Amino acid sequence: MMMLSTYSVLTENQSASVFWRIGLTRGGCVQLTLDDGVESDKELIAEILAIKYLLYQKRVFDHQIGTGKGFQLNVSKGAIKKCALGKSGKQHVLTHAKYLAGVPEMNIQVSKDDFRNVLEDPQVDVISAEDIIEETRVVETPCLGDVVVLRHAVDRYAQRITDGEPKNPWASLVKRLMHPALQRLTIPENVLTHKERKYGSTKNLELWGHSNSALKLLLINEPEKSRKLLITVFQRGNQ
C-alpha cells in the first residue's frame, strides 16, 4: 500500500507549513498561503489543500489516483477523515475537501506523529491556495496524454450532453477522453472570438473530437507541464 503522511502547523495569520513524507525519510514541506477569506480552521484547510496539491499536482506517488484503492493517508487532523466520510458539519471546510469524495476507497488514518525531525533535506514548495488547480483528477489518455479535468468541464458536460443523461458524468466524460479516435480539430472563428474575450489569448487552445460525435472538447495545452487542461465541452454549433 502506498502511504502519505502529513503534519500541519500554522506559521502566520494566513500561512501554514504542511510537512509530508512517504516511507521513513523521503518527504518535504508545503508552505501554503491561504485566501484572505479563510477565517477559521486554517491549519485544517491548509492540510486538506496541501494533500490535494501533493497527490494531483506534485504527484508524489508518481501514479494516477483512481478510486483511492491501494493508497493510505495518515493525517494530523481528525476532521479530514470526517470530511472524506461526509460527516463534517463545517461547510467552509467541506468546500475545500470535495476531492476526497472522489477517492472513496482511500484509507485515511489519523496520526499525531510529528515526523519533522526525521526528514532528510526536505524540499520546500511555496504555493498559495490559488495555485491549486480547481479539479484534482488527472486522466492519462491515449491521444491527448495527461489531461487535468476541471470541475467546470464536468459541469458543462452534464448540462450539454444530449445523447442520454449519464448517472455518473465524470465516468462518462472520462470514457470519451479515452476514445482512441480523438483527433485535433480546427477551432471555429466564433469560438475563438468568444474564448479570446474570456482568456485574453487563444495561443494554446486546442479543440478535439471525433467524427461520430457532435461533442467537442476544448483544452489548454501546457507543454511546460506536459499536460493539457480540459476547460469546457460543447456540442457542435454551441459554445
Image: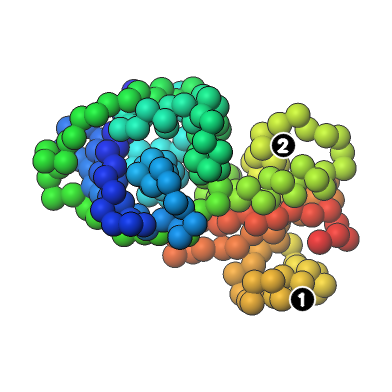
Helix, strand or loop at label 1? It is helix
Seen from the viewer's position, the closer of residues 3 and 116 is 116
Disc on res. 237: none
For badge 1, the amino acid type reads Thr
Could you tell me which quadrant the C terminus lies in? Answer: bottom right
- Mark 1 and mark 2 lie on one chain; the one further toward the N terminus is 2
Inspect this view and state whether residue 70 appears: no
Helix, strand or loop at label 2? It is helix
Q: How crowded is mark 1: few (under 14 residues within 10 Å), some or many (20 or more)?
A: few
The percent coordinates of residue 98 (x first, y second) are 55, 38
Seen from the viewer's position, the closer of residues 134 and 8 is 8
Q: In this view, does 234 lie above or below 93?
A: below
Q: Which residue is drawn at 86% across and 60% down?
A: 238
Inspect this view and state whether residue 21 appears: yes
Apparent side of residue 190 relative to residue 202 in the rendered image (left or right): right
Seen from the viewer's position, the closer of residues 224 and 115 is 115
Q: Which residue is drawn at 11% across and 41% down?
A: 117
Residue annotated with mark 2:
169
The percent coordinates of residue 92 (x first, y second) are 53, 43
Residue annotated with mark 1:
193
For badge 2, the amino acid type reads Pro
